[in-house]
Amino acid sequence: MTLYRESIPDNAVIMMRRVLNGECVSRQISADSVEGEDLALLIMHAFRDGMTEESELVVLARNCVEDGNDAEKIKRRTADIKSGQPLL
């Protein structure tokens, strides 16, 4: 696991938590579940890679549910972000 050199501002953490909680409610999952943790990683990595607007993160998270298997799609998108693949 890579440690980041700069910290994330508190207001950004609150915003990412709001995105996560909203998506977990809409999917009827717990943020503490495996799928919830994968979703949190997706949101965090996307934020670190430049998606700093709440609306961008919501769209990214929602797009991960449209094709069916949420957990697998979230894992693929997180891997894409980590490897530098385009998000769209």
Image (cartoon, grey):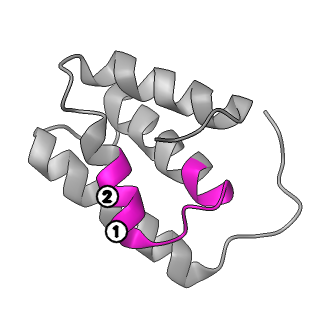
User: Which quadrant is the N terminus positioned in?
Assistant: top right
Q: Which residue ends up furthest to the bottom in the rendered image?
A: 11
Left/right of residue 1 with respect to residue 39 in the rendered view: right
Q: Amino acid at mark 2?
A: Val
Is there any visible trace of residue 33 in the rendered image? no
Assign the magenta stretch its main secondary structure.
Answer: helix
Q: Which residue is mark 2?
A: 58
Q: Position of residue 22 (x, y in %)?
A: 21, 59
Name the one closer to the observer, 10 or 57. 57
Q: Which residue is mark 1?
A: 55
Q: Secondary structure at mark 2?
A: helix
Marks 2 and 1 close (CB-CB < 8 Å) = yes
The answer to whether residue 36 is magenta is: no
Residue shown at the point (37%, 48%) measured from the top left:
60
Specify the segment rendered in magenta.
46-60
Name the one closer to the observer, 33 or 73. 73
Residue shown at the point (64%, 32%) measured from the top left:
85
Locate residue 5: give its quadrant: bottom right
Rendered image: mark on residue 44: none
Residue shown at the point (72%, 29%) measured from the top left:
83
Whether residue 5 is situated above or below residue 7 in the rendered picture: above
Is there any visible trace of residue 21 in the rendered image? yes
